[in-house]
Image (cartoon, helix red, strand yellow):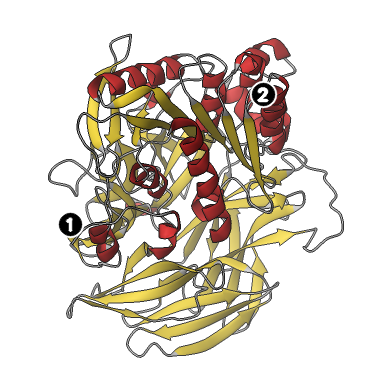
Amino acid sequence: MKQIPVAIQDFMALHYVSDPRFSLDGKKIAYLVTEISREENAYRTDLWVYARASAGSTRLTQSGCVRDYFWADADTLIIWKTGHGSTTVCRLDAESASLTPLFTLPIAAKKIRPLSDGCFAITAVHDSQPEPARYHILDEAPFSSNGQHYTSGRRTALYVYEAASGNLRRLSDETADVDGFTYRAGTLIFQATPWQNYRPYLYSPAFYAYDVKRRETRQLTNVGRINSFALCFWKDDSLLFSGIENCPGKSMGQNSDFYTLDTGSGEIRRFADADMKIGYGGTGSDAKYGGGQGICLGPDGVYFLSPVMDGSCINRMLFDGSIEKNITEEDGFAGSIESFDLSVSSIVCAKMPRNGVAELYLDGRQITHFNDAYLQSHAISAPELFSFPARDGTILHGFCMKPYGYMPGQRYPAILHIHGGPKTIFGDVFHHEMQLWASNGFFVFYCNPRGSDGRGRDFADIRGKWGTIDYTDIMDFTDAALHRYADIDASRVGVCGGSYGGFMVNWIIGHTNRFAAACAQRSFSNMINFEYLSDIGLTNIRSEHLGSCEQGVDALWNESPLKYAPNCNTPTLFIHSDEDWRCPLPDALEMFSCLKRAGCPARLCLFHGENHELSRSGRPDNRITRLQEILNWFKAYLQ
C-alpha cells in the first residue's frame, strides 16, 4: 500500500492517550482518550478501561468532558463534571459503564481525591471577580496568567468535603494559593503560598498537616528557602518532595533535587542530588494532549519522570538515595513517556515511541493501538539522530527529517526548527507540524543546543547568555546539517520557532542573513516590555537575564532582538495570539512594525481568543489556519 503524505488537518484524526491508572487490585487500567470533533470544533475527552485478563479496552463514557478521575475500589471509578460554580460527582461502574450521581458541590472543583471515611480533598479556584465581567480591577502582580487572562483576586483553594454531613470546609487561607497535596493514613499534607500584592514566581510555600479525624490543621513550616514541587509520602511517614533552593543565583529553570520533611518536627533536609527535572517529561510535540501522574511511590523507592538526553523516561530513586535512570527501556531510549502508574510488579505508561503518538505500554508492551492505522498509512519521515561538535568542542545532538519522495541528488529546501523553553528538548517522536513540512518537500532539521533540558544543570544554564552560546550552537548545527545532508539547498533554508524559539528567530534575523525566510511564533523581542507585561516576567528577567529595568535598561536592551531588527532583510511571518500573557502581543507588534519600516517583507497573523498554547491545544480551526499560514509562507519564499 502506497503511503500518503501528512496533511494539515491530520492532527484531528489522531487519538491522544493520557493519564493511565491501575485499579486498586491491579487487574484493570483506566485511561483517558482525547479526540477532536470537527462538528463541534472542540476537544472531547472520555474514559476507557483496559482489562488485563482479556487484553481488551472498553469505552466507559460518551460525554467528552472527562478531565480527571480516580479509582474508588477494584471495580468502580469516580468522575465529575464542573459547571458554573458547581460540580456533580458520580460513581462509574467499570463493567457496566453505568453512572450514579453521588453528590453536588457548590464550587467548581479542579481536583478531587479520596481521604477516609467518606471524606474528600478538593481544590477549586476562588475568584473575587467572577466571569463574565464588564471590567476588571487589577491590584496584584502578576496581574495575568497564560490561559487564565486577568488573575487579580484569584486563588487556588483546598477544601475537605464530608459526604455524610455535606460539610465543605476550606482549609487554606483566603490569601493562599495551594500548590499540591498528598494523603496517607488520616493525614493530609498540603503546601500553600500565602501572598498579597505581589507573588514572585520562585516563592517557597509553607507546609501544613490536616488531621482528618480531629479536623485540625497544623502548620509544619514557614515560608522558607525551598521552592517545592512534586511530593509524596516517604518512608517513616516523612514527606519526600522535589525542590529548588530559593536563594540568589537560582534560576526558574534550575533542575530540582530531593528533600525530605519530617511531619512531626517540620525539619527539612536535602536528601539526594538529582540534578534533573522531577515529575515531568517535556519532549516537544504538537501531537499530545492531556496529563497524568509523573511521580509514584513504589515498594523499593520513588519512581519519577524526567527528561534524559533526547527523551523523557522513568527513573527510580531507592530508599538509600541512589538514583537509577531510564529503568524501563532495555536499549536506553525512552521516546517520550508522558505519564505513568505503578501496580505491585507492573508499570503502565502513556508513551510516545519513535515516530509515534502516545499509546499505553504495560511493562514495555504496547496495549492500545488507536493510532496504528494512521501511522502505517502515512509517509512518516523518520528523524535521524546525529552528533556534532560545537565550536568550543562540546558534543551536541541534532535530528534531520528527509522530505516526502526524497530522491538522492535532487536539491531541496529546508526548515530549521528551534524549540521553546529554552529548558525543553526535541526528540524523534511524532511532531505533526514537522511531518507536514517534510510531506510538502522540505528537509526539516532541529537540535538541542545549550540551554536545553536532559543533560544536567550546567548544560541548561544560559542565564545572562541568551543570544550568545545558544545562538552559536544553532549556527554550528546548521553548518553541520548542511554538510551532512548535501541535498539541502543552502540558499533555500528557512528558520522557525515558538516562545523561546520565537525569541531565537527574532534574534537570528537581526544577526545573520543566511536564512531565506523566517517564522517567529508566540515570540518576544523586547526584554524591557517582557519584565512588566509577561506573566512570568517580574521574576524571569532577574533570574534568567540577571538584570532588571531598575538596575538599568541598557543590559536588557542589548539582549533584546528588537534592537537588531533594523538589520533584518529576511522575509518574516509572525504568528501570535491576543491572549498570550507568556509572550505578550506588543513584542510581536514591535518586531513587525520595525521590519515594515525597514522595508523587509513581513506578515503578522493574529489569532483572537487564543493564548500561548495555540499550536498544541488551540481551537482546531485556528490550528489549521496557523499551519496553512506557515506552510504558505515557506512555500512562497523557499520553493
Among all residues in the image, which is located at the extreme left? Answer: 330
Q: Which amino acid type is shown beneath numbered disc 1?
A: Gly
Mark 2 surroundings: few (<14), some (14-19) or many (≥20) residues within 10 A: many
Tell whether 398 sits left or right of 598. left
The quarter of the picture where the C terminus appears is top left
The quarter of the picture where the N terminus appears is bottom left
Which mark, by number, is residue 57?
none
Tell whether 400 sits left or right of 562. left
Q: Nearer the viewer, mark 1 or mark 2?
A: 2
Secondary structure category for the residue under label 1: loop
Residue 426's image quarter? top left
| Residue 486: % across, % down | 25, 23
Residue 125's image quarter? bottom right
> Relative to 210, does residue 442 appear above or below in the rendering?
above
Give the residue drawn at x 77%, y 52%: 153
The residue labelled by disc 1 is 364
Tell whether 88 sits left or right of 440. right
| Residue 501: % across, % down | 50, 31
The residue labelled by disc 2 is 595
> Relative to 89, does residue 388 appear above or below in the rendering?
above
Give the residue drawn at x 60%, y 29%: 540
Q: Which amino acid type is shown beneath numbered disc 2?
A: Leu
Q: Nearer the viewer, residue 210 or 7?
A: 7
| Residue 155: % across, % down | 69, 54
Secondary structure category for the residue under label 2: helix
Residue 223 seen by the camera: no
Mark 1 surroundings: few (<14), some (14-19) or many (≥20) residues within 10 A: some
Residue 61 seen by the camera: yes
